[in-house]
Image (cartoon, grey):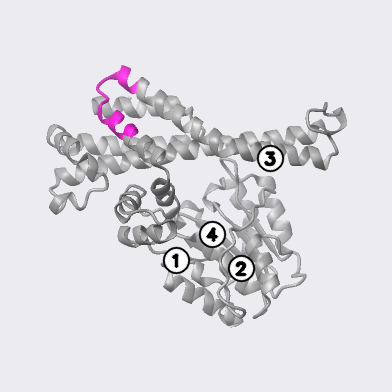
Amino acid sequence: MASTAVEPAPETGADAVPWGAVWGQDDAVAALQAAASDPSALTHAWLITGPPGSGRSTLAAAFAAALICEPGDERAMRQVLSGTHPDLAALRTEGVIISIKDARALVERSYFSPSLGRYRVIIMEDADRMTERTSNVLLKALEEPPERTVWVLCAPSDADLLPTIRSRVRTLRLREPDVEDVARLISQRTGIDVSVAEQSARHAQRHIGMAQRLATDAAARARRDATLRGVLAVRGVGDAVEVAGRVVQAATEDAKALTAERDEAERSSLLRTLGIAEGAAVPPAVRSQLSALEDDQKRRATRSLRDGIDRVLTDLQSLFRDVVMLQYGRGGPGDADLINRELAEDLRALAAAWPVARALVVLDQIAETRRNLEQNVAPTLALESMLVTVASGRTL
């Protein structure tokens, strides 16, 4: 099972769960605090929904700590927040989908009684990455869990899960923070100038993690700007092919940069565990373990690449959303309602040149491309098709 540690959060006192690490979600915190303190109000299965970066995982970790730990047990709390407590099972897929094998392993863990804590908590992040067959593995466990087991699923929206799953959970919807709030948080965290933080929060569409990356990485900001300007310059099939190739190449390099160091560290750690010196030949008896690690790393690289392309498509949706806003006279004073204000002149020219129907066709095609990528369509072909629509206003 691809188990990952939940990101540690700062402690807020000997007797307090670190709810303060959950930023901007006071209503959700209050609801889960009440459930954790009153067994009669506790639901056996929860679904926390909200856009990427809204704090779903952090909230799930805080809730798990409140359920598992006795008040004042700081050692247990640190174990929960680091993902090492025996009564916590957490799953975040590093592949494109959650496998049936991983789901079954999680279900098996859910039937164990708590060994040290008050409850056993099962956290499934990225629950929207389950196929229908995988979702069916969870149904009985969600419907009839042991008395002291609590499931916490996380997903962008309840619509991303099957109705049969939704009917067995209590949904808690997180609110989307304002751009100004995200900018203030990023500036406080990083010391970045407020104007850069505001631009990054706006471009990230309030995704806190992505906003922080943009704010602290000038190359990432430049790459985003170059991609959007490249798409605006697409005029024909040749341009579409060239820009699609550049986008996939940039996403591939990003994915490699994000995973290469971790891949090497994992390989070195496995070889040390097996007692194999650096540079020595790998004995045939243990090659299967190395192959299994390499397969996991390939799946992680595939997801990282597709996530990177999906972020580009999200940026493009914001670009053509701005065009439609301008076409309907909704840009706001000083272009205040635009996500990509820095490109306002180009966007106004496009809004004047295109009929509204063409901009809407492009937005629909971007959404369709995102769905196709989830079905493992070749990224370059999917982007080429989408960019041809940008150039012509017609789908292939």
Name the foreground residue: 278 vs 314: 278
Of helix, strand and loop, which one carries label 1?
Answer: loop
Residue 300 at what x, y percent from top left?
60, 39
Write down the residue under mark 1.
23
Specify start and end residues of the magenta stretch as a single range. 226-241
Does label 1 or label 2 sit earlier along the sequence?
Answer: 1
Q: From the image, state whether disc 1 or disc 2 is nearer to you.
A: 1
Location of residue 219 with respect to 16 vertically, above or below: above
Does label 3 or label 1 sit earlier along the sequence?
Answer: 1
Location of residue 337 with respect to 302 vertically, above or below: below
Point 43% across, 56% down: residue: 190
Of helix, strand and loop, which one carries label 2?
Answer: helix
Q: Quadrant of residue 326?
A: top left
Residue 112 at what x, y percent from top left?
76, 65
> Which label belongs to residue 265?
3
Of helix, strand and loop, which one carries label 3?
Answer: helix
Residue type for callout 1 = Trp
Residue type for callout 2 = Ala
Q: Quadrant of residue 38?
A: bottom right
Write down the residue under mark 2.
64
Is any part of residue 167 visible from this angle? no
Does label 2 or label 3 sit earlier along the sequence?
Answer: 2
Q: Is residue 155 left or right of residue 99?
A: left
- Quarter that holds the C terminus: top left
Residue 139 at what x, y percent from top left?
62, 58
Does label 2 or label 4 sit earlier along the sequence?
Answer: 4
Q: How many angstroms separate mark 1 from mark 2 (CA)?
A: 17 Å
Residue type for callout 3 = Ala
**Label 2 crowding class (10 Å Cα cut-off): few <14, some 14-19, many 20+?**
many
> Which label belongs to residue 369?
none
